[in-house]
Amino acid sequence: MKHITFYLDFISPYAHLAFEQLPEALMGLSYSVSYKPVLLGAILKHHGQLGPAEVPAKRDWTYRHVQWLGHHHGVALTMPAVHPFNPLPLLRLAIACAGGGDPNRYVCETLLRHVWHGGADALDATRLQQLHEQLAPALTLDCEEVKARLRQNTDEAIAAGVFGVPAYAVDDKLFWGFDALPMLRDYLRGDAWFDGTGWSSAGQVKQGITRQR
C-alpha cells in the first residue's frame, strides 16, 4: 500500500477541488493519506512567487476557472466573500484538532467547506467561533506547540520540493495541482512510464535564460 502526504492550505480553491475529488480519482486503489496543513504564503515567499490571486490579470480568470472546474466535476464551490485572506486561524485550528499528529479527513473537509461553500467571509468572527466550538471547543489555537507544528509542516513541504498546493508526495515523487490527480493515479497503479526518462530526464533540461526579478 502506498502512502500519500497531501499538502494543503484552506485558502486554495484547487486544494478544495483536489480534496473532494481524491476518493473518486483513486477509486479501486489501495493507499493511505495524511493531510498536512501548510502556510502557502510562506512557501510562495520561499520560492519568490506570487499567488494567482496576487496577479491582477490572473485573479479574475482563476476565480472563474475554479468555479467552472467545480461545475464540471460536480464539486460544490462558491468563492468566499473575501479572497485572498489570512488562513492562519483555519490552519491552526486544523493542527490543534490533530493533537500532535495530522488532522483527519473530517476536520479538513469541515474547514475547506467552511471556506468554499456558501460564499460567506471565511474569517467572520461569529463563523470562526462556531467552527471552533464544533471542532475543538476545549483547545487553544495560539499556543506555541500549534504554531511550531505549522512551521514544521511548512518547512517539511519546502524541503520536499513543494512550491504550491495541493501537492501530493508519494515515495520519492511529488505531484502538484488538481489536474495532477490522473497522473497520481497512474503512478499508484504502477504505470511503467514513471520508471523511464519521461520522469527522470525533466531535471536535466538545460536552462537557456533567466529573467531578472
Image (spheres, rainbow, N blue to C red):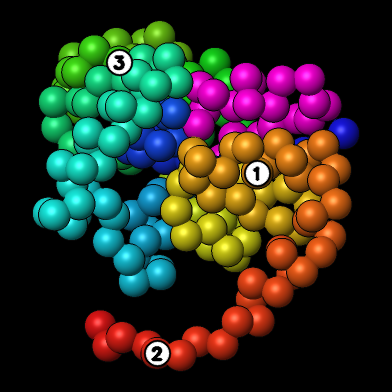
Q: Left or right: 48 with respect to 110?
A: left
Label 2 and label 1: CA atoms lie apart by 29 Å
Q: Where, quadrant-wise, is the C terminus in this rendering?
A: bottom left
Question: Relative to residue 209, is residue 132 depicted above or below?
Answer: above
* Residue 128 visible to the viewer: no
Q: Amino acid at mark 1?
A: Met
Q: Where, quadrant-wise, is the N terminus in this rendering?
A: top right
The span shown in magenta is 18-36
Answer yes or no: do the residues labelled 2 and 3 have beta carbons within 8 Å?
no
* Residue 67 visible to the viewer: yes
Label 2 Cα neighbours within 10 Å, binned few <14 / some 14-19 / many ≥20? few
Q: Amino acid at mark 2?
A: Ile
Of labels 2 and 1, earlier in sequence is: 1
Label 3 and label 1: CA atoms lie apart by 27 Å
Label 2 and label 3: CA atoms lie apart by 43 Å
Residue 13's spot in the image, x, y percent?
Answer: 35, 34
Q: Which residue is mark 3?
A: 117
Which residue is rendered at x = 73% and y = 48% of the image? 170
Which residue is rendered at x = 57% and y = 44% of the image? 180
Q: Which residue is mark 2?
A: 209
Which residue is rendered at x = 71% and y = 64% of the image? 199
Q: Tag 2, which secondary structure?
A: loop
Quarter where residue 84 is shown: top left
Q: Amino acid at mark 3?
A: His
Q: Which mark is residue 42?
A: none
Of labels 3 and 1, earlier in sequence is: 3
Residue 140's spot in the image, x, y percent?
Answer: 41, 28
Q: Tag 3, which secondary structure?
A: loop
Q: Tag 1, which secondary structure?
A: helix
